[in-house]
């Protein structure tokens, strides 16, 4: 059960606008949005960053979604594992690939480029963040500087979302109901 229930309906004008767009985009107002609606400046900033991430299209949305889902499993965030799994399936990522996400390093289902991105997501999700020159050079082989900025921002943003939701115990909302979702990585879960 979530630690904070959030606003069910109503709230500030900004909250009502964001609720409208959330329903339009994913079919319902998500629990993180309801929770952030308790603090209008936070909701506003969150919305602005979501719009910026959505407009950034120099890196494949599919590869960013894989990184997002990997981060959710590292943090142990059930909400983002749920919605991220559904999002990956909408982009054509198979359940077999989702099942191998926890073992992507040795899986033949992931391209070298995907593996480099997932290793980068792993490193950016660790504390402290340590990105070796070797890792950065690997990223640089597949992405130009503008794309690296977008990819790094997307990974950092997913860390924010997953950690916010996990800390407040915001639960999944059935986006992947009766479908496969990767399990959280056990070594990070307390």
Image (spheres, rainbow, N blue to C red):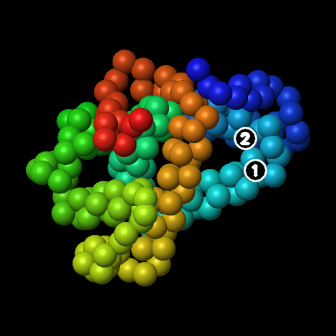
Q: Residue furthest top?
A: 178
Answer with the quarter of the image where residue 54 lies: bottom right
In this picture, is 15 found above or below 5? below
Q: Position of residue 129 (x, y in %)?
A: 42, 65
Residue 163's disc is none
Q: Residue at x 70, y 51 (%)?
A: 47
Instruction: Tell whether 185 sits left or right of 7.
Output: left
Q: Residue furthest front?
A: 190
Residue 79 in view here: yes
Instruction: Tell whether 141 sits left or right of 67.
Output: left
Name the residue tied to disc 1.
42
In this picture, is 172 found above or below 80? above
Q: Position of residue 120 (x, y in %)?
A: 34, 64
Callout 2–callout 1 Cβ contact below 8 Å = yes
Answer with the quarter of the image where residue 36 lies: top right
Q: Position of residue 72 (x, y in %)?
A: 43, 43
For the residues marked 2 and 1, what is the alpha-carbon distance in whole angstroms? 6 Å
Element type at marker 1?
A: helix
Q: Residue at x 51, y 44 (%)?
A: 162
Q: Residue at x 43, y 73 (%)?
A: 147
Name the residue tied to disc 2.
36
Picture quarter with the C terminus: top left
Element type at marker 2?
A: helix
Instruction: Tell whether 112 sits left or right of 151.
Output: left
Q: Nearer the viewer, residue 105 or 149?
A: 105
Residue 89 in view here: no
Q: Earlier in the sequence, mark 2 or mark 1?
A: 2
Q: Nearer the viewer, residue 56 or 145?
A: 145
Answer with the quarter of the image where residue 37 lies: top right
**Other residues around mark 2 within 10 Å, as few (<14) / some (14–19) / many (≥20):** many
């Amino acid at each position: 059960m979530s630690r904070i229930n959030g606003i069910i309906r109503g709230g500030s004008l900004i909250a009502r606008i964001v609720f409208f767009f959330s329903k339009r985009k994913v079919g319902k107002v998500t629990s993180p949005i309801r929770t952030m609606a308790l603090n209008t400046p936070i909701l506003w900033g969150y919305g602005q960053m979501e719009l910026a991430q959505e407009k950034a299209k120099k890196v494949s949305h599919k590869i960013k979604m894989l990184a997002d889902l990997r981060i959710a499993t590292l943090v142990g965030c059930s909400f983002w594992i749920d919605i991220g799994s559904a999002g990956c399936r909408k982009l054509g990522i198979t359940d077999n690939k989702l099942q191998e996400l926890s073992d992507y390093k040795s899986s033949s289902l992931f391209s070298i480029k995907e593996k480099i991105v997932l290793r980068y997501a792993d490193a950016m999700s660790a504390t402290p963040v340590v990105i070796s020159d070797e890792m950065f050079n690997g990223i640089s082989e597949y992405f130009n500087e503008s794309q690296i900025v977008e990819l790094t921002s997307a990974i950092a943003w997913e860390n924010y979302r997953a950690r916010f939701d996990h800390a407040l115990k915001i639960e999944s909302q059935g986006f992947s109901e009766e479908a496969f979702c990767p399990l959280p990585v056990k070594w990070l879960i307390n």
